[in-house]
Image: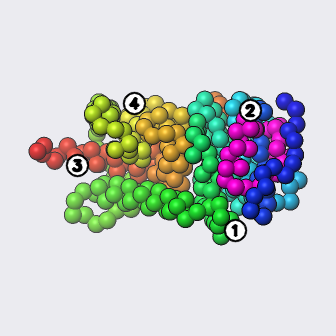
Amino acid sequence: MGAFLTGTGNQSGFDGPPVLLAATSEAALSRAEAAVSAAGLRIGAKLPVEEAAARIDQQVSASAVWIEIDADCGGALDALLSKVDEDVRNQRYAAVVSTDRAMVDIVAAHIEERAVEIIVDADAAQRATALPFAFASREFAERINDVAGDNNAERLRQLSEEVSRIASTLARLSDGPGSRPATMENVAAGDAPPLSADTVRSVIRARRLRSRYFPEELFADPAWDMMLDLLQAEIAQLRVPVSSLCIAAAVPATTALRWLKTLVSQGIFMRHADPRDGRRVFVELAPPTSQALRRYFAEVARVPAI
């Protein structure tokens, strides 16, 4: 694939540094251009993935980098994703990675930084709001108030608060009613009550049955669904890649990945590289989370049915 044009791109009211686009094809580049233009940002360099990492190093400043993936470029893609992950961690710029489900595991293997916005099979609205969300998560809102609105920052705050609430609830349940509030750390010290895979599977099955009678979004609870899936896998001694966990979350993959990154950052889940495939990671429950879930099931089993 030849080098893409470098130009001024969209002209808007935004006077800050431009957005650099990197894509795996001309068609992917067109989609990225449309999304960045919809966000009202100025487009700078437009490059194939193979040239993007070097150009980013040469760039004096950039407000953001948008990577659009519709094909696997091998090592060049791996290197670019790893670089962007590190740069965003160092607060050099904001970043969006747009991909499809087929590439989720590869992207997740290289992007650990929570502030990198990953969108999967996104529609026009999700694509238009991806950059504002990325800016808000890196606290760039003061620099680009016309782009990163309060609603995006509020969504991030609510997500963080919800995960913290789940962690606190699991910790309290782990020591049973009437006991002192537990921390996730001291839960791990106790013995885990026995729990069968059939019990967990029956809960998962019951949750999925609701979609036959009610809209799925009415009961969306991705954190809990992912916890149950990982608990079932732990009991069965199976390893769960990111792509499978996104399916278990029963929400759009973009939403599932946001939850996953937050749950990992909170220490509720853990990531482990696949020793046989450097382009894939597995996810598992952190030991305190596993202990708390097992004690939760033991506690529920003692509650009489009404």
Specify the color scheme: rainbow
Q: Which residue is mark 1?
A: 143
Q: Is residue 132 left or right of residue 78?
A: left
Of 115 and 42, the residue lying toward us? 42
- Identify residue for label 3: 299
Does any portion of residue 12 appear in the rendered image?
Answer: yes
Amino acid on which disc 2 is placed: Ala
Q: Are marks 3 and 2 in contact (CB under 8 Å)?
A: no
Q: Is residue 190 left or right of residue 79?
A: left
- Is the residue 205 above or below the residue 305 in the image? above
In the rendered structure, find residue 27 and report the number of the disc placed on it.
2
- Tell me the CA gap for discs 2 and 4: 43 Å
Screen quadrant of the N terminus: top right
Tag in front: 3 or 1: 1
Is 285 part of what is drawn in magenta? Answer: no
- Mark drawn on residue 236: 4
Q: Secondary structure at mark 3?
A: helix
